[in-house]
Image (cartoon, rainbow, N blue to C red):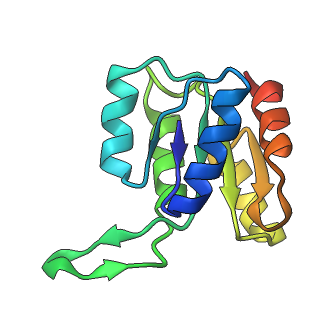
């Protein structure tokens, strides 16, 4: 499952992953991701860190770090905690990588210079 709020990135990786035989589910919404996890057999999650969040009053928080929160919750849920999660983000500091690892990320890819094959390789490493 691909959790990402940039449509152009989702579209690119959907084509590439399906071409390489992967079943592809995607969402830009954390709540929808939880629903997908309950209804589909997911082998791995590719998760952005910065995911837009609708706040009270309809405001959109475009810098919400929902990916970390989602990762932390999944790792605490017995039925989901063993699903590999690859962080896929434009954040590329040692602190970001360390936080993701501490919260239970299986791998971390910097979007800025990633090629589709890099993600395929990471998925193959963790599943």
**Would residue 112 appear left or right of 53 to someone viewing this image?**
right
89 is higher (above) or lower (below) than 2? below
**Splitting the image into 4 quarters, where does residue 86 fall?**
top right
Question: Which residue corresponds to the image point at 68% horizontal and 20% vertical from the top-left?
Answer: 21
Question: Which residue corresponds to the image point at 33% horizontal and 25% vertical from the top-left?
Answer: 38
Q: Position of residue 14 (x, y in %)?
A: 60, 41
Residue 10 seen in the figure: yes
Question: Which residue corresponds to the image point at 54% horizontal and 67% vertical from the top-left?
Answer: 50
Furthest residue toward left: 57
Q: Position of residue 73 (x, y in %)?
A: 44, 43
Q: Position of residue 8 (x, y in %)?
A: 57, 61
Q: Position of residue 40 (x, y in %)?
A: 40, 20
- Disc count in the image? 0
User: Which quarter shows the C terminus?
Assistant: top right
**Would residue 41 appear left or right of 2 to someone viewing this image?**
left
Question: Which residue corresponds to the image point at 42% horizontal and 55% vertical from the top-left?
Answer: 28
87 is higher (above) or lower (below) than 24? below
**Would residue 120 appear left or right of 56 to someone viewing this image?**
right
**Splitting the image into 4 quarters, where does residue 125 fall?**
top right
Q: Nearer the viewer, residue 18 or 65?
A: 18
**Would residue 102 appear left or right of 120 to someone viewing this image?**
left
Q: Nearer the viewer, residue 32 or 97?
A: 32
**Splitting the image into 4 quarters, where does residue 68 fall?**
bottom right
């Amino acid at each position: 499952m691909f959790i990402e709020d940039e449509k152009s990135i989702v579209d690119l990786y959907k084509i590439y992953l399906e071409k390489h035989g992967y079943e592809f589910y995607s969402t830009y919404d954390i709540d929808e991701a939880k629903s997908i996890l309950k209804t589909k057999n997911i082998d791995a999650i590719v998760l952005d860190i910065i995911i837009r969040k609708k706040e009270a009053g309809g405001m959109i928080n475009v810098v919400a770090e929902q990916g970390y929160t989602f990762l932390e919750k999944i790792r605490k849920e017995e039925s989901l905690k063993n699903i590999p999660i690859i962080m896929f983000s434009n954040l590329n500091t040692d602190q970001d990588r360390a936080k993701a690892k501490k919260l239970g990320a299986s791998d971390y890819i910097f979007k800025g210079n990633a090629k589709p094959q890099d993600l395929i390789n990471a998925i193959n490493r963790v599943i």
